[in-house]
Image: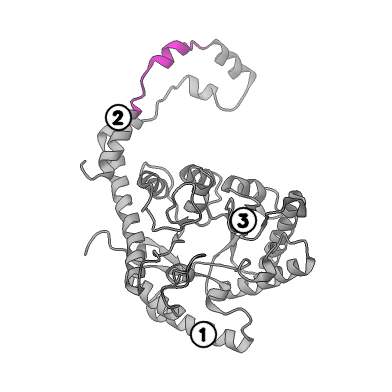
Amino acid sequence: MDPFDPTPDDRFTFGLWTVGNTGRDPFGEAVRAPLAPTTIVQRLSECGAWGVNLHDNDLVPFGASAAQRDAIVREFKAALEEHGLCVPMATTNLFSHPVFKDGAFSSNDPKVRAFALRKTMDAIDLGVELGAKTYVFWGGREGSEADACRDPRTAVARMRDALDYLCEYVVDQGYDLKFALEAKPNEPRGDIYLATTGHMLAFIATLARPQMVGVNPEVAHENMAGLSFVHGVAQAMEAGKLFHIDLNAQKIGRYDQDLRFGSEDVRQAFLLVRLLEGTSGTERYSGPRHFDAHAYRTEDDEGVWDFARGCMRTYKILKARAQAFDADPAVRELIAEQRDAVLEPLCKGYSREKAAKLRAAALDPAQLAARGLRYERLDQLMMEHLLGVR
């Protein structure tokens, strides 16, 4: 077996909306026929995926009757069991229907906010029924073009009320479920509230049950803002808030492209995989590796599965490269942590005695500044591992 072929042990997941994307864009109609959810489950299993995720309406069409909903879910659950896939994450579509044209939880209309809460509670029930343990919130319509329509503080307060309400709903129902918030700076709104992972982390601290809520960073969304995705993910991990992650690729300065993972900026993809896998000796991310991407518009049905396998293979190749990089003696020497048994204790945990000793320490800034760090050498070693020549 090819060591880079995916297996369920890799915990790779895709959304129904990702491999089910028909290739439609704002300038052209669909180029592929829609795929039935049960077909997607079968094909993902054949590709070596571990799980499949969904919005509520990816599976149950908007407006379906209770009987139709139950029949669809029953068929889907049978497909999951037959093909050995699970549903680790679910979410709600609060952006497609025209009712959400000016927001869902942040809308000025209380009837829209009420409908959004009811739709989300129903979707949470569906996700839990399918076995989901994480529930993602992407506020695609929670924003504005005409900013005078509402005070942004009001929008944030309304979103806080909604998240607090839904946390209490989950607790009241006895569900084993946690929430993950997904940031994006713009598109489809001109500006979206809580635009980055950093915004989300600050917002979570204001919730009534912050322990239930983390983040779901997405490569493309942070790159759209011109930010380092690796740094955003690292901050979430350091805070214990990386509850889920969306992997794809993105060219900086473009619309949200959702390209095949690793197909742009291989350096950042390498550093991200290195971070998630903890190959340098740090804590490893244990959650699903979810690909929120889709095949090029140029592809037919088989091209979709080339795309899916490509996402997973690239991740595994980068993982192997990261393991080799961090095991390289030359790399280990360059990144070895510097230790100072006298100074380090003085820099942690303030006391008057420590401050006095720190002031008295012999520290020569000119001498410290003169030392070269050899990061050029380190970066070149990384490139050589990435290019497969080391």
Q: Which numbered circle lies on residue 377? A: 2
Give the residue pinned by disc 1: 74
Mark 1 → mark 2, Cα distance in angstroms: 57 Å
Q: Earlier in the sequence, mark 1 or mark 2?
A: 1
User: In the rendered structure, are the residues bearing label 3 and label 1 in contact, judged by CB atoms less than 8 Å apart?
Assistant: no
**Magenta residues (range):** 361-375
* Image side of residue 334 versus residue 139, left or right: left
Q: Which numbered circle lies on residue 213? A: 3
Q: Given the image, on which type of amino acid does mark 1 rest?
A: Arg
Q: Position of residue 187 (x, y in %)?
A: 58, 56
Which one is in front, 306 or 389?
Answer: 306
Q: Position of residue 136 (x, y in %)?
A: 57, 62
Q: Is residue 353 above or below residue 326?
A: above
Q: Position of residue 38 (x, y in %)?
A: 44, 80
- SS type, badge 1: helix
Mark 3 → mark 2, Cα distance in angstroms: 41 Å
Q: Given the image, on which type of amino acid does mark 3 rest?
A: Val
Which coloring applies here?
Answer: one colour
- The mark closer to the camera, 1 or 2, is 2
Q: Residues within 10 Å of mark 1 (few under 14, many from 20)?
A: few
Q: Residue at x 53, y 82 (%)?
A: 73
- SS type, badge 3: strand
- SS type, badge 2: helix
* Image side of residue 1 versus residue 47, left or right: left
Q: Is residue 372 magenta?
A: yes
Which one is in front, 17 or 277?
Answer: 17
